Structures are given as structure tokens and as C-alpha cells.
Amino acid sequence: MSVVRLNEQQSMAVKQTSSPLLVLAGAGSGKTAVITQKIVHLITRCGYQPNQIAAVTFTNKAAKEMKARVGKLLGDSSVKGLIVSTFHNLGLNIIRREHRTIGIRQNFTIFDDQDSLALMRELCKKDVDADKSELIEILNRISAWKNDLKLPDQAIAQAKDNDELLAAKLYEAYTRSLKAYNAVDFDDLILVPTLLFQQNETIREKWHHRIRYLLVDEYQDTNTSQYELVKLLTGKLGNFTVVGDDDQSIYSWRGAQPKNLELLQKDFPNLKVVKLEQNYRSCGRILKSANVLIANNPHLFDKKLWSDKNYGEPIRVLSVKEDNDEAERVVNEILSRRIKQNLKYRDFAILYRGNHQSRLIERALVIKQVPYKVSGSTSFFARAEIKDIMAYLKLLINPDDDNAFIRIANVPRREIGATTLEKLGSYANQRGIGMFAAIFELGLEEHLTGKGLSAVRRFGQLIVKASDNLKRGDTLAVLNELLAYIGYHGYLFETSSSPKAAEYRWSNVAELLKWIEKGIEDNAQAEDPFATTVTKICLREMLDRNSEEESEQNEVQLMTLHASKGLEFPHVYLLGMEEELLPHKSSIEEDNIEEERRLAYVGITRAKETLSIMVAKQRQRYGEMINSVPSRFLEEMPQEDLDWEEDRQQLSDDEKRERGKNNLANLRKMLSS
Ligand code: ATP
Ligand code: MG
């Protein structure tokens, strides 16, 4: 990043260090830039050592970028000890250092969602017969309590009905079990340090000494326990700068409290507030559309935002027949615009409301061999079910692939536990062969006996049989037979959070099989089309992993609207601007349109030069084609700046006549009925 010349308000925000500061401003006004510059200012002008400063960002990616920017401005060696991390990482750091006082052993485990679910299932077995969605609901309640700083005894005392009381009691049991397992869960990473600071003054003082100045980006998305942590970390002095935008608060489902912005003024009477008003990111038209849209929400604070960049091209609304066409259209556009306008792949971002929307796009990108990167959430290839099936395929084409073997030896469960795997592994090591090959050696019987031995032998035979069948039969039929034999479908139902989630995961598997089928067709000339296909997909998978490391990769960026917060891209495609997708169905049902509008605002304001909004008329949902209606947000945007384009080639004459009417007239009718 080149050094930007700060405007007057930005400079004020950077230089203001004598009292706590809130920078309140709309998207693209340089809030994050202020944080970066302020770190530099604190080090070069105010005598702070880098290790006395902590900056909190919302994602690891943002943290990495910020540290790199400060490093560039000051030289990498001068930022040693500077903490730039997410709230959760900062919390983890504190727990690691203070584990003795907290009362957990050093090598504690961090429970992920699956671990928490398994524990809750165990706990529930004793009392009630809860199904998976009920377990999740209880865990969500516990999470909300933790984010709200409520401990089990408070939750029990304040329970309003029997359901809540049951959940509160399970919260207590869950907390006790975590302790017994020497584990913390995700919410504990904030809750535990907060409680520690509340209860232990000496430790609090120690950390005040350690962190002399705190900066927080995306402050509008802090929840109660994160805010408490900020207060405890900075103490009465209030040596902090927080920046935020109430219009971009999009994490209410994680307990985010935009009213924390207001609370700051109450809690720190000497708080200074700086507002930034110039947007440096987007063309005038994009900014205007975003402002007009968000004006439909009530506001905590008055904000203005203007841009002196050019007005820019109209915002295109591209209407396509189906979701498949949406994917194809976007990818074709990117391919041709890249060449015509001499752009890089990384100049394009594809944003969507839900993770599941990436699947068709990923397929279209892979087919057209466009390099891409999914950030902030799981790429198709990183999904557990895809990794499982890929591991089976890899093992089938290369029995020496120990990683693949280990991944699926016990998936679905077949009594090959960790000890059995360890013994098999060490025997294979001794013999200098792969684990799969070791299964069939007689010598293994000296190391493994009984159930373990017969379980691995059965597994070995299963793979050998499938591999033989592949040589003779139709590949897809053999793979389907294998999946049926191992009961993978049922396994997904056992391990997913809900039947819906299981169905979705199963449809991912079906999708992968389709890719394989297509790959075999495309590689029909190869000596072994199946092996060639699997190898090619693995290569793509590896690219996926490597690009984590290389942020400068030239790849199309894919991410959810949530994950796009704080980022910017020259050209943005916003997928699925339809009722029930954006705004999302669940938010419509809960009457929480404002949060969805903020999400749309975040999406629109990511674009620097052009914005294209996709609307499909039909979309596949849970196996069915469903008609969809353009989002109400399209109607709320300034019509003079939108350029609706029908995908006429794909319409029949009748449809063309039908669609001849103005889209918006249709939409209005729909909304008023
Ligand atoms: P968001 O609300 O989306 O997080 P933000 O307020 O954090 O946005 P930044 O990402 O800091 O905004 O800045 C937006 C863009 O404007 C960046 O490309 C940044 O480099 C640029 N910018 C910020 N301040 C200035 C300035 N004074 N002069 C020129 N460019 C600037
Ligand atoms: Mg920002």
C-alpha cells in the first residue's frame, strides 16, 4: 500500500491520543487506514514500543494484512512484538499466558462446534432424548449466555421457563465437563480472559502494563463480552481507538451489539468522536446507491458520505434464467472482461449470501480453468464430506497414500480406533511400506490382534474389491456401490447438525461424482481417465491450500457477504439478489430485514469501479427448482442508476413478451399483494 495523505479528520483521529477515541464513519472512508497509520504514529511519534500496542481486527486475514502494511511503512524489524490479531486470538494468547491462574493445564484443547456437539449429546443422554437440532439450539443458547457474560448460576436463576431452565442446567454441566476435559470452547476464548480480568486485579494490572494502547477495527460487531474485555484491557485511562460503522453491523446472530457504540459514550465520558465523511473507495454511483439503500434503516448516528471519484458506470442488474446460468454468465463475463479491459483475475470478487451458493460458481470456474480462491469459509474442496470421498478416490488410485488412508480408515466408523491406527502405522514404518500394504502382511499379527486386526483387514478387502471392480466395471456405478456399501449417506445423517445439513452434504458428494463423470469424459484419451481426473482435482485442491499462504495470488475472490467486510475489489459480482436469499428467508420470517439491508450495504460498498447484481428467475433448493423474485432491495436502490438487462437469448418468444413489462412493476405488485 502506498502511503495515503490523510485528510483533516483522519489526521485528527490519528493524532488524538490523550483520550479514548471513537471513529464513526461509513464504508470506505478510511477507518482501517486510520488504525494502520495510528499504529505507525504511536511508534514513531509517541514513543510507544511495538510490543505495547495491540490492534484487534475481525478476521485473521485482516490481521495479517494490517501487520504487513505496518511492516511496510516501518520496516519489518520494527514491528516485532506488535500484536495484531482477532479478538479470539488475543483471548487465546491471554489464556495461554495465564492458564495457571485460570486453573487449566497448559496443553488445553480448543473445542470446535463438532466437539461441543458431541459433548452436549453425551450430556443429554443422561436426562433427555434430544435430537440434533435441539442440541444445537441448546448450544446456541449457551453461546448467547457466554457472549452476554452470563454464568451458569445466573442463567439458572434467571430462567423464564422449563426449557430455559433445562438449557441452563445443561450449561452448568457443559461447563463442568469442559473443565474436566481441560478444554475451552470458542466463546470461552473471550469469556475466560474477561472473567479473569474482572476477578484478578494483579493480572489485570499486568496486562495494562503489557498493552498500553488498544485499537479495534469493526467495533460495531463486538458483543457484550468483547466490549467488557476492551474495557478491562484499557482500564480507566481508556487508551484506545475504536473504529466502526453501525450500518455495517452484520453479526447480531453472534451477539453483536451495535449499541456498544453508544455505550462507549456513557462508559467513557471523555470519549472523543471523529466522523469521516469522504469515501475513497467507490465511484459516485455505487456510493449513492449504497447510501440510498441504507437510508431505509433507522440510524443510531447521523453520517454523511461523499466521494470525489468519477460517477462511474451504471450498476448492471443481470437477470438470468436459472442459478446454473448465473454461474456461467459470471464466469464468462470475467473471462471476457479480463481480456478486453486488460484486468487481472484478482480484480474480480464474487459475493453471495450463503456458503452453498459457491458450489455452482466453483464448478463453472473449475470447468473454465479460472483460478479462484474462497476466503473466510469453506471451499467445496475443503468440506469434510468432499475430503472424505476424495481420500477414498486417492486411496483407490494410489494405495500408498497414507494421508488418505488415515483420513478414512475409520470413516464411517468401523472400529479402527486411534490405537489400532498407531500400531499399524508403526509396523508399516518398521517395514518401510505404506499402511495399506501393511494390512496384508502376516507380520502385522504380532502387533495387532483381535477386533483391531479383523477391522483393518475387512477395510483392506473393501478397498481391494472396489479397486478390482474399477478395472472392470463402469466407474460411476462402482463408486456409487462403494458409497452404498460403506453407508456414507447414513453416516452423514449421523454426523450432521440437522437432516437438512446432511442432505446438503450428500448433495455435495453427488456433485463431486458428477465432476468425476465429466472429468472421465473429458479425459477419455488418457491411459487411465479415472486416475487422471482424480489427479487433476487433487491438483486444484492443492492450489487451494497453497493460496492460503500467498495472498498476492492472482485469483478470482469468492466469499460470503459476511466474510467480505472490510475488503475492497475493483469489480464486484453480487449473486442471488432475490427475495429469500438477500434478504434471507429466515430473516424475513423473523422480521429482521434491517440486518439483511446492512449486509447488502456491505456487499455494494466493497466495489470500487463496477458492480453487477445477479438475479436468477429459478433456483435449485434442496433438490427442487423454485421460482424466485428480485430482492426488495433492488427496488430501494435509485432506479436511475440501475441498468436492468434481460438475458434475452435464453428466453422463449412468449417469455420475452411476458418479460417485456418492467421488472420493477412486477416486483411492486408482488410486494403490495
Ligand atoms: P470499511 O468500512 O469497508 O471497512 P474503511 O472505512 O475501513 O472501509 P479503508 O479500507 O481504510 O476504509 O479505506 C478505503 C480505501 O480508501 C482504501 O483503499 C484506502 O487505501 C483508501 N484511503 C483511505 N484514506 C485515504 C486518503 N486519505 N487518501 C486516499 N486514499 C485513502
Ligand atoms: Mg475497514
Image (tube, rainbow, N blue to C red):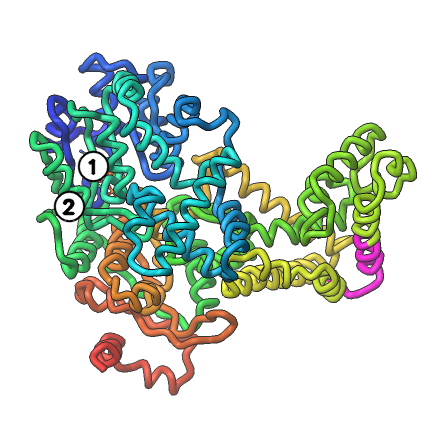
Magenta-drawn stretch, dominant element (helix, strand or loop):
helix
Q: Is residue 644 left or right of residue 473?
A: left
Task: Pinpoint residue 111: horizontal percent, then vertical percent.
Answer: 49, 40
Q: Could you tell me which secondary element the residue under label 2 belongs to?
A: loop
Are the residues tagged 1 and 2 within 8 Å (C-beta)?
no
Residue farthest to the top, as pictured: 47
Label 2 neighbour load within 10 Å: few <14, some 14-19, many 20+? many
Q: Amino acid at mark 2?
A: Ser
Q: Quadrant of the C terminus?
A: bottom left
> Which range is magenta?
462-475
Task: Pinpoint residue 131: horizontal percent, then vertical percent.
Answer: 51, 62
Residue at left offset 87%, top offset 37%: 444
**In-front residue for pair 277/309:** 277
Q: Is mark 1 within 8 Å of ligand 1?
A: yes
Q: Can residue 235 be seen by looking at this rendering?
A: yes
Q: Amino acid at mark 1?
A: Val
Residue farthest to the right, as pictured: 442
Q: Quadrant of residue 285?
A: bottom left
**In-front residue for pair 484/96:** 96
Q: CA distance from mark 1 to mark 2?
A: 20 Å
Give the number of callouts. Answer: 2
Q: Is residue 436 left or right of residue 264?
A: right
Residue at left offset 30%, top offset 63%: 587
Residue, disc 1: 243
Residue, disc 2: 307
**In-front residue for pair 126/673:** 126
Label 1 neighbour load within 10 Å: few <14, some 14-19, many 20+? many
Q: Which quadrant of the render holds ligand 2?
A: top left
